[in-house]
């Protein structure tokens, strides 16, 4: 049974005991569900978190004012005072209180005033995203929060500390304060000083929770265990090369990356469910080298045994059996019509039609088939070209055998340090199971490799690879993230680091930025509002940032945040940007930055892909005609699901994905790899970029 929540460290024991006594001594009627409004202490805490802003400000693509209430920046050109900020907050707060009260009433959950305040604070900041079945904190509330330990509740609340995939320190502090308010009723509490976290990067694998919180000053006790098919997990390692262990003492923040024996990212076929499989073969044991192959193919109905309960692994496979197993594994279908001929004649016909076999080469489908012939049939069926050159085999030098060896479909037998294929011998049932299983795995892997399958898997959709759009030439395994700096260890590319800024960063000390080694900066020129009016707005820090960056010796580019819905509007945005530049030179491109907005009043909702692409082209052509280099900014969702990329190949790309390695299939010149970098001379967080082709 898990440790109860109220069993806290010594400094919270008194509060915990008081709460236990209250909960256990109150009559049932006193615990009936009731509705609340936020207390004065709760309001003060939310105002502290949100911090009053008199002017509209942008955060993650949306605009806010006052105490974090949504707005259209065009509605408040002169800003607001605190009294107006409170009036806006009160309306916003009532909406969040209604959401939380509705949650409690529907699920018959009773809480205290301070627990209600904590949930309203979360909802004020997060919206309803945490109020979904399957999410931990929601589940804990419905099941009965008293069943869960302090650490479980802290993690259930504090897990909501990200923007995209990046951990935001101000959200960490807020979530921990809310967690301790919920647990112990303290509006001013030491939650952020009681817990630290590990941010886990599974490096191509999967992990249940990427960010996990641990009590500070105590051994971690248990670290997350990632999984990755066909790879052995070797441990969690920090950027300095030191391994993190369960015995290490928890500190405020640690970034770790999984190390795998195989290295790099692997794509492997999904595992077969063996939960209902019972070994039917009395002559196949779990210790046999072929056991896993026989089990897989037996569980999926590809092979079966004999009436006497045996599998007869050493029995030689006939030509008909071999052709059927190989062709079906490679993806070919049986027509099901042998027209009174041998049951395997359809497979022989297919092999001859494909050019795997010559007419009359196999006369008896019940006879054996040589390994050399099997290699030719398999390679051709899989679409592999023969390979030539040095051979690892002592007894064969065959292009098809080498092609299959290179794809790990067959590997022969090693005897006294030499590798043999025995090309003129037949193949037994155990060996055939191994070959078929590997073809199945190869087929799945190539289907998930866009260069081989012709499709890009994104979300739950397959997108055909666009042959006229160049693929990215970068090797994901050569990227190294060290703190806020990204390195790409490929001598073929000369990379430089840069940032992009807007009025959100306010005053920037550009001399410090340059001294820290950053070589370029994109400056926001302005933006179009996402509301109905769609007004054009100049970034209030544009000229100051442009001049400051240039004076400090950084190369500069610029971008305009677009919400255009026609090509004419995109031209209008380009002309607005050009007028703001007023002929000033740029080293890096002038960028069209169109992004999706989730707000209910977003003017770009439902914009067709054709019109969006027209807008990008119109902006870029207008920029190019004025002598500037155009560029388009997008992330994977916009690239794969919105833009018609085959119409945009004339323009450079600035790609955004906040990760330790990119996974964009198509080419790009600049990668925005983080939105939460720390750079000397800049207060708070800033977007980080690496350029592969310095301008």
Image (cartoon, rainbow, N blue to C red):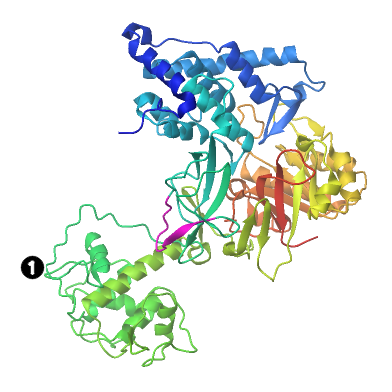
Residue 103 seen anywhere in this rendered image of the structure: yes
Q: In screen coordinates, is 302 left or right of 409?
A: left
| Vertical side of 12 occupied by 430: above or below | below
Density class for disc 1 (Cα within 10 Å; few <14, some 14-19, many ≥20) is few
Residue 304, position as x, y percentages in the image = 17, 66
| Vertical side of 302 occupied by 626: above or below | above
Q: Which portion, as a residue range, is magenta?
A: 225-237
Q: Residue furthest front?
A: 10
Q: Secondary structure at mark 1?
A: loop
Query: Residue drawn 88% across and 40% down?
Result: 543
- Between 61 and 605, the one lying in front of the other is 61
Quarter assignment of residue 314:
bottom left
Q: Residue furthest left?
A: 308
Question: Where does label 1 land, which residue?
Answer: 307
Residue 121 in the magenta stretch? The answer is: no
Q: In screen coordinates, is 384 left or right of 587?
A: left
Residue 111, position as x, y percentages in the image = 43, 16
Query: Residue drawn 19% across and 85% down?
Result: 367
Q: Quadrant of the N terminus?
A: top left
State the count of labels: 1
Residue 178, position as x, y percentages in the image = 54, 26
- Between 64 and 652, the one lying in front of the other is 64
Residue 286, position as x, y percentages in the image = 21, 66
Q: In screen coordinates, is 460 left or right of 88?
A: left
Q: Quadrant of the C terminus?
A: bottom right
Query: Magenta region, mostly helix, strand or loop?
Result: loop
- Between 67 and 183, the one lying in front of the other is 183
| Vertical side of 429 occupied by 455: above or below | above
């Amino acid at each position: 049974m898990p440790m109860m929540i109220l069993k806290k460290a010594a400094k919270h024991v008194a509060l915990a005991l008081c709460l236990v006594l209250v909960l256990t001594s109150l009559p049932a009627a006193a615990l009936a569900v009731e509705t609340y409004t936020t207390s004065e202490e709760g309001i003060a805490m939310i105002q502290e978190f949100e911090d009053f802003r008199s002017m509209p400000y942008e955060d993650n693509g949306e605009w806010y004012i006052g105490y974090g209430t949504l707005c259209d920046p065009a509605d408040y050109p002169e800003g607001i005072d605190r009294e107006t900020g409170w009036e806006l907050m009160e309306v916003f707060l009532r909406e969040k209180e209604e959401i939380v009260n509705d949650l409690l009433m529907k699920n018959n959950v009773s809480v205290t005033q301070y627990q209600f305040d904590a949930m309203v604070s979360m909802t004020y900041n997060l919206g309803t995203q945490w109020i979904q079945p399957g999410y931990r904190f929601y589940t804990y509330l419905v099941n009965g929060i008293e069943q869960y330990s302090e650490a479980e509740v802290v993690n259930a609340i504090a897990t909501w500390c990200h923007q995209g995939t990046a951990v935001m320190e101000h959200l960490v502090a807020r979530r921990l304060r809310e967690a301790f308010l919920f647990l112990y009723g303290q509006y001013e509490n030491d939650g952020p000083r009681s817990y630290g976290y590990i941010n886990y990067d599974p490096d191509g694998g999967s992990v249940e929770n990427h960010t996990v919180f641990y009590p500070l000053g105590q051994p971690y006790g248990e670290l997350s265990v990632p999984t990755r098919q066909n790879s052995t997990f070797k441990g969690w390692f920090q950027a300095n090369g030191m391994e993190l262990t369960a015995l290490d003492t928890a500190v405020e923040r640690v970034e770790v990356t999984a190390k795998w024996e195989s290295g790099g990212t692997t794509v492997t076929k999904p595992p077969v469910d063996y939960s209902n499989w019972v070994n039917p073969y009395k002559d196949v044991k779990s210790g046999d080298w072929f056991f896993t192959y026989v089990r897989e193919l037996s569980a999926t109905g590809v092979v079966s045994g004999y009436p006497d309960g045996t599998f007869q692994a050493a029995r030689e496979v006939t030509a008909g059996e071999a052709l059927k197993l190989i062709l079906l594994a490679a993806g070919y279908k049986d027509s099901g019509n042998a027209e009174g001929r041998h049951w395997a004649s359809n497979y022989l016909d297919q092999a001859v039609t494909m050019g795997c076999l010559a007419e009359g080469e196999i006369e008896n489908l019940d006879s054996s088939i040589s390994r050399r012939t099997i290699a030719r049939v398999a390679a051709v069926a899989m679409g592999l070209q023969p390979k030539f050159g040095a051979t690892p085999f002592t007894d064969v030098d065959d292009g098809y055998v080498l092609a299959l060896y290179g794809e790990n479909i067959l590997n022969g037998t090693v005897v006294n340090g030499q590798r043999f294929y025995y090309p003129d011998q037949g193949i037994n049932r155990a060996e055939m199971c191994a070959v078929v299983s590997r073809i199945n795995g190869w087929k799945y892997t190539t289907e998930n490799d866009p260069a081989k399958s012709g499709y890009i898997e994104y979300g739950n959709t397959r997108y055909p690879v666009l042959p006229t759009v160049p693929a990215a030439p970068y090797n994901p395994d050569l990227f190294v993230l060290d703190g806020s700096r990204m390195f790409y260890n490929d001598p073929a590319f000369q990379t430089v680091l840069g940032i992009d800024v807007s009025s959100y960063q306010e005053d920037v000390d550009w001399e410090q930025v340059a001294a820290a080694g950053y070589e370029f900066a994109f400056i926001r020129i302005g933006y179009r509002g996402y509301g109905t009016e769609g007004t054009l707005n100049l970034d209030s820090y544009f000229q100051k940032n442009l001049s400051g960056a240039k004076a400090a010796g950084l190369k500069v580019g610029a971008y305009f945040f677009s919400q255009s819905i026609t090509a004419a509007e995109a031209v209008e945005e380009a002309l607005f940007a050009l007028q703001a530049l007023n002929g000033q030179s740029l080293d890096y491109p002038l960028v069209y930055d169109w992004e999706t907005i989730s707000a209910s009043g977003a003017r770009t909702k439902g914009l067709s892909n054709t019109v969006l692409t027209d807008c990008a082209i119109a902006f870029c052509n207008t920029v190019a005609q004025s002598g500037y280099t155009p560029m388009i900014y997008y992330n994977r969702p916009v690239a794969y699901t919105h833009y018609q990329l085959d119409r945009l190949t004339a323009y450079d790309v600035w790609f955004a994905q906040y990760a330790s390695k990119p996974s964009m299939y198509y080419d790009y010149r600049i990668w925005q790899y983080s939105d939460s970098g720390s750079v000397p001379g800049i207060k708070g967080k800033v977007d980080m970029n690496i350029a592969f082709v310095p301008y």
